[in-house]
Image (spheres, helix red, strand yellow):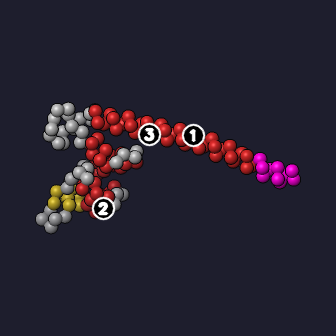
Amino acid sequence: MKMKISQIAKQTGISIRSLRHYEKKGLITASRLDNNYREFDDSIVEVIHTIQLYLNLGLTTDQIKDIMYCQYPGNDEFGEKDEYCDELLQIYETKLVEVIRQQKALADAELSLKKHINLMKNHQDNRNQGG
């Protein structure tokens, strides 16, 4: 089934502007009607959900393109996909290190906030008790 960009936007919750950006970046493709309107195959919905997943992980559109269109080693043909290519492994490993670093920073922040909250509550309790 073919869909126009407004239908894709409505179904996915992604703005038309974002969809045009994804197309410009080479993440999605559309055919053009005689009136120059974009027309997408309905399978694009799943691709857009994948793009959103990767964006939510903090990947850039260029990194996402590398992931989605990773080539077989030694193959210069664009579009043949190897989901276990070296570039993808490197991107995942880098992102994992970032996530671990962020988790540690959040855990440290949590401990610090709890400590300050306890100190402030103790101070308030002492003040309220007159002492």
How many angstroms separate mark 2 from mark 3 (CA)? 31 Å
Looking at the rendered structure, the secondary structure element under dot 3 is helix
Which residue, given by chain and number where applicable, does mark 3 sit on? 98
Kind of element beneath mark 1: helix
The residue drawn where x is 49% and y is 41% is 102
Identity, as a three-letter code, of the amino acid under mark 1: Ala
Give the Cα distance between marks 3 and 1.
14 Å
Mark 1: few, some, or many residues within 10 Å (few <14, many ≥20)? few
Residue at the spot of label 1: 107
Q: Quadrant of the N terminus?
A: bottom left
Circles 2 and 3 in contact, beta carbons < 8 Å: no
- According to the picture, the residue beneath numbered tag 2 turns out to be 16
Span of residues in magenta: 122-131
User: Residue flagged by tag 3: what amino acid is it?
Assistant: Glu
Percent x, y for residue 85? 26, 33
Q: Residues within 10 Å of mark 2 (few under 14, many from 20)?
A: some
